Amino acid sequence: MAVRTFEVTGEMKLRLGERRKFRIYLRGLGEKDVLEKLYSLLGSRHKVTRNHVKITGIREVSPDDVEDVYVKALAATDRVVLYA
């Protein structure tokens, strides 16, 4: 399986009732993996639960369309080597 790049758009409800729109580029094997990563990131950054996140769109994008520099560089690499 190849790792693909996805653009996820949506809206989250913050603590004071404020709603904030977001667009995040994530890499994963499929939409399920990307959604799990999204919920994990938003939960750790903003302390929101899955019930407070509304996904409006998820689509696969090419690495050239990505605006996030980190994700674009990661998409350009052929392989990643981790040392333990």
Image: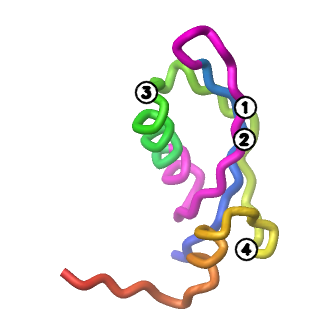
Label 3, secondary structure: give it.
loop
Say which label, 1 or 4, has the lower sequence index. Answer: 1
Q: Which residues are magenta?
A: 14-35
Residue 4: horizontal and vertical position, in percent?
Answer: 62, 69
Q: Residue at x 53, y 44 (%)?
A: 38
Q: Is residue 61 above or below residue 78?
A: above
Rendered image: mark on residue 9? 2
The residue beneath circle 3 is 47
Spatial separation of the CA atoms under disc 3 and disc 2: 18 Å
Q: Nearer the viewer, mark 1 or mark 2?
A: 1
Assess whether mark 2 and mark 1 are in contact (beta carbons under 8 angstroms): yes
The residue beneath circle 4 is 63
Assess whether mark 4 and mark 1 are in contact (beta carbons under 8 angstroms): no
Q: Nearer the viewer, mark 3 or mark 2?
A: 3
Rendered image: mark on residue 21? 1
Q: Residues within 10 Å of mark 1 (few under 14, many from 20)?
A: few
